[in-house]
Amino acid sequence: MDNKMKNILISEEQIKEKITSLGAVISKDYENKKLYVLSLLRGSFIFTADLVRCIEVPTKIGFMTTSSYGHNEESAGIVKVLNDVPDNIEGYDVLIVDDIVDTGITMSFIKDHVTKLGAASVNCCVLLDKPDRRTVDIVPDYCCFKIPDLFVIGYGLNFGDYYRNIPYIFNWKE
Ligand code: IMP
Ligand code: MG
């Protein structure tokens, strides 16, 4: 594991720098709006915690849990809501925050879901984007890093439910 973990794709410093500048952009875009940050668990908990501390406009923050890859690297293609949005978001400008857009199935489903709940606007913000893997037509409104088609782990992203606590992004390489 030690050797694999040394294969760092995005360092702590790079992540911190990007999030700081993204927070400033979001703060500007959401001035005089009713921002509601909707964080998708579990993958985005670390990203959300760092991002919201760089957002300077008033915001509510809620968490929702959807089904994810579990122990496989391939998506099941079906999104299940395990814990729904905990607040009435009618009239709020919702910013969905997730760790990564891969096929796009999850984000596209959640965008529809949030729209149906009466949000005034719906945008999405991700730490990582893997555009080569897309099967659904969706482009994140805010994104920190575009990455190639690699399975990545760390900074909230898991493999077999482990490694979410690693503070940087790395990929498997024997
Ligand atoms: P999508 O629905 O295919 O876009 O997949 C979204 C979810 O799959 C993400 O929220 C992650 O939980 C998971 N996922 C996709 N790619 C990776 C990866 O490279 N590492 C870890 N999890 C991933
Ligand atoms: Mg996820």
Image: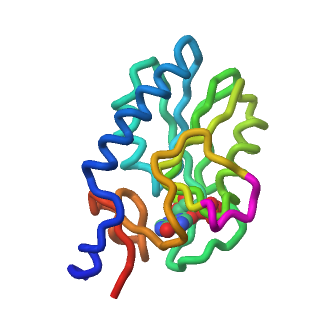
Relative side of 1 to 28, left or right: left
Give the residue displayed 55% in from the left and 40% down from the top. Answer: 142
Measuring from the top left, give residue 28's x and y in whole percent: 49, 19
Q: Which residues are magenta?
A: 131-137
Relative side of 106 to 38, left or right: right
- Residue 129's place in the image compared with 148, above or below, is above
Measuring from the top left, give residue 112's x and y in whole percent: 76, 44
Give the residue displayed 46% in from the left and 57% down from the top. Answer: 43
User: Is 154 in front, or is 114?
Assistant: 154
> In the figure, residue 58 lies in which quadrant?
top left
| Outermost residue to the bottom | 174
Measuring from the top left, give residue 14's x and y in whole percent: 31, 49
Give the residue displayed 39% in from the left and 20% down from the top. Answer: 56
**Is 133 covered by the magenta stretch?**
yes
- Residue 53's place in the image compared with 9, above or below, is above
- Residue 73's place in the image compared with 145, above or below, is below
Give the residue displayed 39% in from the left and 37% down from the top. Answer: 51
* Quadrant location of the N terminus in the rendered image: bottom left
